[in-house]
Amino acid sequence: MRIGLLTEGGYPYVSGEAGLWCDRLVRGLEQHEFDVYALSRTEREEAEGWVPLPPQVGRVRTAPLWETADDGTVHGRRARRRFAECYGELATALCTTAPGDPAGSSETLAEEQSALEADRFANALYGLAELARDEGGLPAALRSETAVRALERACRAPGAHRSAREARVPDLLTVAARLERALRPLSLDWYEDDDLGSVDLCHATSGGTAALPGLLARHFCDVPLLVTEYGVRLRAHYLTEPDSSPAIRSLLASFHGRLAAETYRRAAVITPGNTHARRWQERCGADRAKLRTVHPGMDAAPFAEAGESPECADPRTLVWVGRVEPAKDLVSLLHAFAEIRRAEPAARLRIVGSPFGPEGAAYLAHCKGLAAQLFPDEADGPHAVGRNPVSFEETGGPELPSRADAYASGALVVLSSVVEGFPSGLVEAMFCGRATVSTDVGAVVEAIGGTGLVVPPRNPRALAEACVALLRDPERRERLGAAARARALELFTVEQNITAFHGIYLEILSHTPVRRVVLDDTGAPLPFAVPAEAHVPGRWSDPTARIAARGGPSPSPGSGAVRSGPGWATEGPVRSAAPVSATEGAAR
């Protein structure tokens, strides 16, 4: 089959956190063809280039989200009026009182209003998409004064929630600019029959803007959509917008929530990477019947040597591995280690990782200063040079060439985060057969199961007690490490991930009627290539549909009766949803 892989800030670019996962997926499913549709986030990302692509990647189309170039499209009076109406409806859907807002009068009324606003948002979104298709794009219109004034009217209208009513002109300008960036895929020329319309399945590797081309391919060409999310965009918005005004946070959260709900409603299958993401998807309106949890696949080979020789670890060393940033809460880890040192004076802590951005660099400097205060340099004798029991290191040097060497250097791996999605670093430690002590955040408990100790976040005393308990019990450490390695090899390998998605691809296609005529080498319709029943709308492709036995009522579950005929065969005549073209008739 032919898959349209939709990415944002990842594959096929060299940078991007999701790029490695996508590359493994594409290379593992070599029996399928892939067309990659990539949205780039920064100019640097494009300058760094692409990863080497396997032969099953047939076409790559890219579009920048960072560039604000004007395509020169000038809209006439009718097009401007259509844009004002659609954008006004979109803004109204974002500003209207949400269910659960104190301004809501009742739960029933709130649910009805939520359904109404969801339809209003979808109609406005597809109206803008159709306008962009007819007029050649919307970049100038989305940045125009018309868009800002429409947003202002919606915020001042009766029924707008409190945060929207408090929006000032700078807030409106910021929200309009952010919406323009998020809606740029509406203006792309990807949605023709020979482009995204020609693929058998769209696979969006994340929600939000990356899934928008899949929604439009579903709308214009009826291409089924699969959405994979290892982190929900609405949750990321809450975590990354702490300094914005309440109006900006509220309006953008409403947009991400509405877009997520529409994406989940149109998707054929949704694959969260963990239960934590699944709960967020259900909160945003995802149907449980569409959800299939598929854990991210990781390469276990680099960690095999460390996992097969756990006895080589230093029994007194604790290891932390990750990206240095405030969310990792290394301050709590350092305070916990101070208590560990009082109980186990010979213990040492290795913090392995590089800072992320200017904020990460400042946080690393702060942590180094705190470590120097908590643990003055120690010396073995009066003529020896002292050293700190806490070391800050990076991989790639002679002592720690790789992350596997970092995990192998200690007998206990610690995770102290206050915010975490899927803890890939923790899974790497599990591949290495190391016992772990982690904070209860994100999908940590789901990842480790019962193979490690879990403590509350921002609780140095609990973290210290758990670490001391394992440092003093080597047999327990060994049992937990062996169990962790077995669990990781069973659930989190590349092979299980690829197998799961291969089955999901086949499942979606088996329930999707054929949408096009099959042609031979000369371009003529191929007779009998498409079975007649593939064009018949109905419940025959629904796996939950009840099938009635010929000549009698539907058998009850568990009765053992054989179901031999489709349910719609015993009902009234089935009407075609759309007339069949002469070409399709010839193909039969």
Image (cartoon, rainbow, N blue to C red):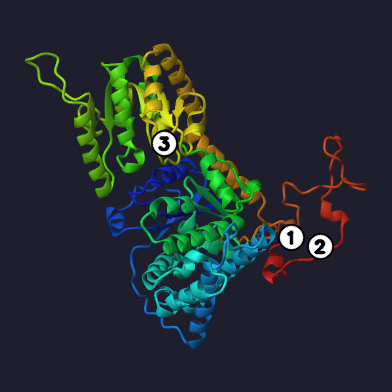
**Would you name the residue on which mark 1 appears?**
537
The quarter in which the C terminus is drawn is bottom right
**Would you name the residue on which mark 2 appears?**
574
Left or right of 463 on screen, residue 525: right
Left or right of 183 on screen, residue 391: left
Query: Mark 3 touching mark 1, by CB under 8 A?
Result: no
Tell me the crowding category of disc 3: few under 14, some 14 to 19, or many 20 or more residues within 10 angstroms, Cα based.
some
Q: CA distance from mark 1 to mark 2?
A: 8 Å
Q: Quadrant of residue 169?
A: bottom left
Query: Mark 3 touching mark 2, by CB under 8 A?
Result: no
Q: CA distance from mark 3 to mark 2?
A: 50 Å
Left or right of 545 on screen, residue 375: left
Image: 169 above or below 354: below
Amino acid of disc 1: Pro
502, 531: nearer the viewer: 502
Of the residues under marks 1 and 2, which one precedes in the sequence? 1
Of the residues under marks 3 and 1, which one precedes in the sequence? 3
Amino acid of disc 3: Ser
Amino acid of disc 2: Val
Q: Which mark is residue 424?
A: 3
Q: Nearer the viewer, mark 3 or mark 2?
A: 3
Q: Residue at x 28, y 20 (%)?
A: 341
Label 1 SS? loop
Label 3 SS? helix
Going by the picture, which residue comes out furthest to the bottom?
77
Q: Residue at x 53, y 58 (%)?
A: 257
